[in-house]
Image (cartoon, rainbow, N blue to C red):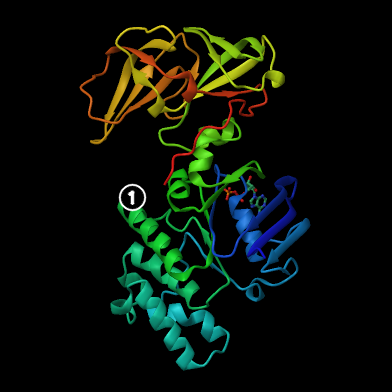
């Protein structure tokens, strides 16, 4: 039995179709991250599960029970928000025990639940303090503690780390992942940050314009994005895209050409979806690009000039102007390529380079954006 199941969930706000026939099954104990750009419907979907939004059609099931018409308090869920929503006049202990007090649970039970949550979240020293005496990270832990004390069947997190600075976000990411390991509860987590999705999720749900684009493990989605949207959304730095035209498409593969790039043939592609003249997109991840000393036959290569260098210590990211190649990369802008070298590099701004890649590393997206290249191996963990 799945822990949470959404069946054909549809939601309209006045004149706006926010969720479109969402079907999703989440297993007991899974950590599922819903990710997508701002406005794609992530929060609406989470609030739908929580019962904070009504839906126009479809069903929400929790542990096999149809909760579509149930009040939030009856659903067995606990939600943690971006704004910690703590009561300023209450102590940490009172904040964490609030839900149980409202449910009229006995004091001994509340004290035990607060103590356990405080131990898990390392808040034992803070129990008598008020929220304003705590750091941002501690406040967020109190908000999580308030959820834990209620022993929910499902935890819902709505961008809980967005208000924290970068170092704390990283720390809380690790803490939330180990909390999940400790509690073994079902957790559904909403974020626009693909790094959070990649690092924390058992499975990622990629949303776009109220629809699910793809569901799968982080590495599966990274290696095998179903379409150009998922390919461009997951990965930092982001995938490079080259606008190209199909030269020929037959059983031996699909041959494509782009201004500034010699024709390349991508094998093993079901060519039935494309024909000569079609506008397609070639995708190549920044780490799959490499510098070539001279143009070797068989390896697609193009020339470019370095516009910007980012030295990250363990890697170097180069932003390369590759005109006339029609490249797009939402990190580096139109006409530019992003290239990631897994080492420190002495290359400076203005340097002229030859950049190459293996055709096996390239993706091909059809005119409708769907991935045409065959499955790639998923990196093993
Ligand atoms: P996300 O969490 O992915 O940023 P939301 O779920 O908050 O997106 O919103 C999805 C879409 O629905 C957005 O376009 C937003 O403007 C719209 N929307 C959200 N809440 C309301 C509302 N109460 N009334 C009208 N439109 C809304």
* Residue occupying the point 42% across, 19% down: 357
Q: Quadrant of the N terminus?
A: bottom right
Label 1 sits on residue: 166
Residue 39 visible here: no
* Residue occupying the point 31% across, 77% down: 126
Q: Position of residue 28 (x, y in %)?
A: 58, 65
Residue 253 visible here: yes
> For this rendering, which residue is in front, 372 or 123?
372
Q: Position of residue 225 (x, y in %)?
A: 56, 35
Q: Position of residue 214 (x, y in %)?
A: 61, 42
Q: Is mark 1 within 8 Å of ligand 1?
A: no
* Residue occupying the point 36% across, 54% down: 169
Left or right of 295 in this view: 99: right
Up the image or down, 105 lies above or below 304; here it is: below
Left or right of 288 in this view: 44: right
Residue 104 sits in quarter: bottom right
> For this rendering, which residue is in front, 165 or 65?
65
Disc 1 residue crowd, few under 14, some 14–19, many 20+, Cα 10 Å: few
The mark tally for this picture is 1
Q: Position of residue 96 (x, y in %)?
A: 44, 78
């Amino acid at each position: 039995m799945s822990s949470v199941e959404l069946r054909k969930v549809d939601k309209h706000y006045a004149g706006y179709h926010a969720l479109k026939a969402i079907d999703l099954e989440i297993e007991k104990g899974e950590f599922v991250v819903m990710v997508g750009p701002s406005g794609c419907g992530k929060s609406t979907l989470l609030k739908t599960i929580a019962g904070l939004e009504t839906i126009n059609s479809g069903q929400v099931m929790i542990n096999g029970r149809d909760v579509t018409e149930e009040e939030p308090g009856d659903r067995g869920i606990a939600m943690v928000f971006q704004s910690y929503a703590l009561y300023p006049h209450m102590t940490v202990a009172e904040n964490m025990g609030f839900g149980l007090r409202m449910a009229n649970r006995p004091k001994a039970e509340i004290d035990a639940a607060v103590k356990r949550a405080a131990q898990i979240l390392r808040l034992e020293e803070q129990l008598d303090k008020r929220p304003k005496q705590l750091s941002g990270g501690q406040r967020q832990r109190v908000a999580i503690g308030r959820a834990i004390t209620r022993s929910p069947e499902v935890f819902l997190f709505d961008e809980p780390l967005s208000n924290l600075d970068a170092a704390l976000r990283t720390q809380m990411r690790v803490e939330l992942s180990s909390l999940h390991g400790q509690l073994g509860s079902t957790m559904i987590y909403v974020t626009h940050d693909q790094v959070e999705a990649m690092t924390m999720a058992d499975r990622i749900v990629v949303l776009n314009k109220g629809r699910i684009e793809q569901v799968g493990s982080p590495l599966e989605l990274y290696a095998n994005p179903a379409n150009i949207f998922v390919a461009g959304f997951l990965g930092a730095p982001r995938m490079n895209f080259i606008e190209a035209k199909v030269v020929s498409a037959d059983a031996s593969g699909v041959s494509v050409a782009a201004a500034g790039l010699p024709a390349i043939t991508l094998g093993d592609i079901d060519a039935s979806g494309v024909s000569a003249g079609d506008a397609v997109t070639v995708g190549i991840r920044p780490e799959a690009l490499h510098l070539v000393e001279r143009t070797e036959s068989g390896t697609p290569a193009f020339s470019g000039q370095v516009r910007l260098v980012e030295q990250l210590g363990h890697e170097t990211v180069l932003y390369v102007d590759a005109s006339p190649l029609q490249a797009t990369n939402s990190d580096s802008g139109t006409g530019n390529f992003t290239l990631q070298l897994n080492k420190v590099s002495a290359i400076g701004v203005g340097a002229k380079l030859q950049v190459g890649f293996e055709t096996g590393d390239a993706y091909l997206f059809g005119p409708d954006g769907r991935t045409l290249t065959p499955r790639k191996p998923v990196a093993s963990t």
